Image (cartoon, grey):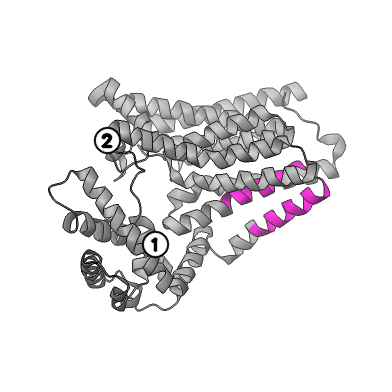
Amino acid sequence: MKKLFSQWDVIFKSLIVLIVIVKVLFTGILYDPDSLAFTTIIFSRSPGYMLFASFFTSVFGNYFEIPLLIAQLIFNLSVCLFATQRLTILFNLNSVFSTIVLVIFITPLVSTYLTANKILTEALTYPLFLLFNVYTLQFLIQEKNKYFTKALLVLFLLIITRNQFLAMVPVLIILISFLWYKSKHKKYLFLLLTIICLPVVTTFFERTFNYIAFGTFTNMPGAHMPAAAAFFVADEKDVQLFTSDKEVQFFTTAMAELKRKQLLASSLPETDYYILYGLYQTRFSRICNQTLHEIAVNQFTDPNKSRKDRLLEAEQLFKSMFWPLLIDNYKQWTVLYIQNIRYALGNTKMFLLYFSLLITGVFLLFKNPRNKIGLFFVFTTLCTFCSLLLLGLVSHSENRYIFYHHWTLFIALLLLIDQYIKATFPSETSRVLD
């Protein structure tokens, strides 16, 4: 019977992989508005995916699309299969549940996000994030330092591809601190120090890349993104916060344009901040890129400077204006920030669901620090909450930024069902996958 199940498991998984390959290849390469920015080396993007995509344009020229598509497909599929195999072993899943896990993992490849098809960072960050989760879980459950090293290397790649994954650093700090608290083993202090140093290493890497490529030892400009929310909740009287002529003129010009386009909270008829945030979320690009950033770069920087230097000049302008606006409007900004997190999860019920998983995991770990289900619940929900907390500070709750965490709820439910079946029918639940 075990051999029969194993054979069917291989057949079903092979069919799933075949369907994905056919779907991805027939769909072909897909472009988003941001795609062209990644096919050449430019100053306004993180280096990770830009280096990856630029390799194919450099080698294959105008015929880069098919090789890039095939490479992304192979990487995404390989990681999904690898992650499925590791979770199957870690949690002793049967062949049916293992196949379901694979279906959950490959869903972003064939629906909505199409991670293997699009020329976007998700083509790398989605499989890398799965690898980070798997290696971290292996470290937490099996206590082998080699998995911690692998998780840290993968996290380095994630951060230099999308800065939002800096949110994983506090997750690791919390978990390693818990392990040190329970065991008092000195090795965890060394691991904590390594994690704390990671943001310094990634910052140094990005600055070094920018120095080699563009001649400036600085990070990628992006201060206009968190500034968008501060401007959205501001009003015309906030011009009194600024003393320099440049800041006053920019604020006056930007606010007038935002008001004309009805992109200010004060110019919208809605007073319910949940609805108001929905309007902010759908208009974020118009507020941030098409108005604030465009005005700053085109009207308030030296036109004789290079594009790179004008971006850096605009960066300094946004940095100098962000904190005064935030402090003066902190109540409205805080409400908007909370709604950002709430909107990202869908509603309050989803927040309570994630929170209940976190509390359940904490309870299980205090009863048994090595409880696998507890480690999974705590780790994955911390990843979700820390990501939302960081994204709420610097951007908006677009699904493109948070879909990485969608699979965790389905796997959590699957693990609970698996545990129930094993507890109820212990003689019938021997693992049927080798």
Segment colored magenta: 355-384
The overriding secondary structure of the stretch rendered in magenta is helix
Q: Which residue is at a point 50% across and 58% down the rendered structure image? A: 344
Q: CA distance from mark 2 to mark 1?
A: 33 Å
Number of disc labels: 2
Disc 2 packing (10 Å; few <14; some 14–19; many ≥20): some
Secondary structure at badge 2 equals helix
Could you tell me which quadrant the C terminus lies in? top right
Asked whether residue 381 is drawn in magenta, I would say yes
Asked whether residue 364 is drawn in magenta, I would say yes
Q: For the residue marked with disc 1, what is the amino acid?
A: Gln
| Image spot of residue 301 (x, y percent) | 19, 54
Sequence-first tag of 2 and 1:
2
Left or right: 389 as drawn, with respect to 149: left
Q: Which residue is at a point 70% across and 38% down the rendered structure image? A: 188
Determine which residue is flagged by label 1.
281
Which mark is drawn over residue 214? 2
Disc 1 packing (10 Å; few <14; some 14–19; many ≥20): some
Toward the viewer: 202 or 401?
202
Q: Quadrant of residue 134?
A: top right
Outermost residue toward the right?
A: 427
Q: Quadrant of residue 192?
A: top right
Secondary structure at badge 1 equals helix
| Image spot of residue 339 (x, y percent) | 49, 67
Q: Which residue is at a point 62% across and 51% down the rendered structure image? A: 381
Toward the viewer: 118 or 205?
205
Q: Which residue is at a point 53% across and 38% down the rendered structure image? A: 198
| Image spot of residue 305 (x, y percent) | 16, 46
